[in-house]
Image (cartoon, grey):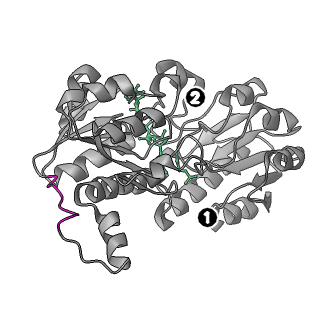
């Protein structure tokens, strides 16, 4: 691949300092400006060759079209739903991410939410802080012997499965791309969603956000679930329809939800966050020292590889992934948009 000249990179979110250090060691000028509003980003982006973001920066078509020199948008993390990949591709801008860097952290938070849901840990802790000692109110249920449905058997889904199997959960799942014999080798029996919904005591979603995954859990699918099913969304807001979830919580069809992500972040409508059977986090799936170190370092190294014209091992076209309906797994762990 021909080398790409990158002289100046804008980092628009809190990214591990190793990212800046690696870029600067390679002669790239770095500016860090966080918490910019959309018009500030549009004004700022004009002269940069590269932009490094996490999930909060919305790299919309107007931002992309305002950039005169932009060649690379680097997502220090997995989901690229905050980047208009089509608009970038039309301008010949490469979009790349670092998906394997935060897999374990996102999987561990998912497991923490599953365990918190089963034993009411956050609610009990809050009650203790309020001076109470209420043992009856927080009666829980064992995870042992319960059925966990995993929708999306990619990197994170797989890691969640192995961890929850160690608690004695039966893991079933669905993925349109991962072959059933592959997931069977990690102890996950695949089946259609129609077969999956009524069997689960817990459901966790681990798909990218895209048109085919918006509202995977909705009024109709909640109605097919066991009464009292508990759900976790550590993937993206909207994969579980928020209004349908609230209705299901109110009717008791859903017995509890663990939410790390929201359609709007932070959510202005607090009805879900405030619901007594909801435990929530402010999008913390990738917020560990280890994940941030990996993602910050990986994105910088990937940008440097592009500058040096290195062949991108296992690079795939993101557009192709979207057509296939998934983020393809590449051997390098990274996904790229076409140039
Ligand atoms: N809360 C957080 O901080 C984090 C959230 N994430 C989110 O988690 C998502 C998943 O991450 P990875 O596991 O690394 O991605 P991945 O690409 O390894 O796995 C996603 C899987 O979803 C499957 N899939 C696509 N459409 C589907 C459908 N309709 N039904 C069922 N499965 C479907 C794909 O075939 C693929 O196997 C990311 O796209 C991102 O949005 C990722 C990291 C941290
Ligand atoms: O990597 C992902 O997809 C995430 O959701 C993590 O987002 P963040 O980098 O923490 O803003």
Is residue 137 covered in magenta? yes
Quadrant position of residue 1: top right
Give the residue at x 27% y 61%. Answer: 120
Task: Please report whichever mark, 1 or 2, sits nearer to the chain's N-terminal start.
Answer: 1
Measured as percent of width and height from the top left, residue 260 is found at 46, 51
- Mark 1 Cα-neighbour bin, 10 Å: few <14, some 14–19, many ≥20: some
The range drawn in magenta is 136-143
Give the residue at x 45% y 28%. Answer: 215
Assign the magenta stretch its main secondary structure.
Answer: loop
Asked which secondary structure carries label 2, the reply is helix
- The residue that mark 2 highlights is 318
Residue 330 in sight in this render:
no
Q: Which mark is residue 16?
A: 1
| Residue at the extreme bottom of the image, as rendered | 131
314 or 251: nearer the viewer: 251
Rounded to the nearest angstrom, the CA distance separating label 1 from label 2 is 25 Å
Quadrant position of residue 104: bottom left
């Amino acid at each position: 691949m021909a080398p790409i000249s990158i002289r100046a990179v804008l980092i628009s979110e809190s990214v591990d300092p190793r990212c800046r250090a690696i870029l600067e060691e390679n002669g790239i000028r770095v500016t860090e400006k966080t918490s910019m509003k959309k018009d500030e980003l549009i004004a700022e982006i004009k002269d940069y060759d590269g932009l490094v973001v996490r999930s909060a920066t919305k790299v919309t078509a107007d931002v992309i079209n305002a950039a005169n020199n932009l060649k690379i948008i680097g997502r220090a993390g997995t989901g690229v739903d905050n980047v208009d990949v089509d608009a970038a591709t039309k301008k010949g801008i490469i979009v790349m991410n670092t998906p394997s860097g935060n897999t374990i952290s996102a999987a561990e938070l998912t497991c923490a939410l599953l365990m918190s849901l089963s034993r009411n840990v956050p609610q009990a802790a809050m009650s203790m802080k309020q001076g109470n000692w209420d043992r009856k109110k927080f009666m829980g249920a064992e995870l042992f012997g319960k059925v966990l449905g995993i929708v999306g058997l990619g990197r994170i889904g797989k890691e969640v499965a192995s961890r929850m199997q160690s608690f004695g959960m039966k893991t079933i799942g669905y993925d349109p791309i991962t072959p059933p014999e592959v997931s069977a080798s990690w102890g996950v029996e695949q089946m259609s969603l129609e077969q999956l919904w009524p069997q689960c005591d817990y459901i966790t979603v681990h798909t990218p956000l895209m048109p085919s995954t918006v509202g995977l859990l909705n009024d109709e699918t909640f109605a097919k679930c066991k009464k009292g099913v508990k759900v976790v969304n550590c993937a993206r807001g909207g994969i579980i329809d928020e209004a349908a979830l609230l209705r299901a919580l109110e009717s008791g069809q859903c017995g509890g939800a663990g939410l790390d992500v929201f359609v709007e972040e932070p959510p202005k409508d607090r009805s879900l966050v405030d619901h007594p059977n909801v435990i929530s986090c402010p999008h913390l799936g990738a917020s560990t020292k280890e994940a941030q170190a990996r993602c910050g370092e990986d994105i910088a190294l990937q940008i440097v590889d592009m500058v040096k014209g290195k062949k991108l091992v296992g690079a795939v076209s993101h557009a192709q992934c979207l057509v296939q309906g998934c983020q393809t797994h590449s051997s390098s762990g990274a996904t790229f948009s076409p140039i």
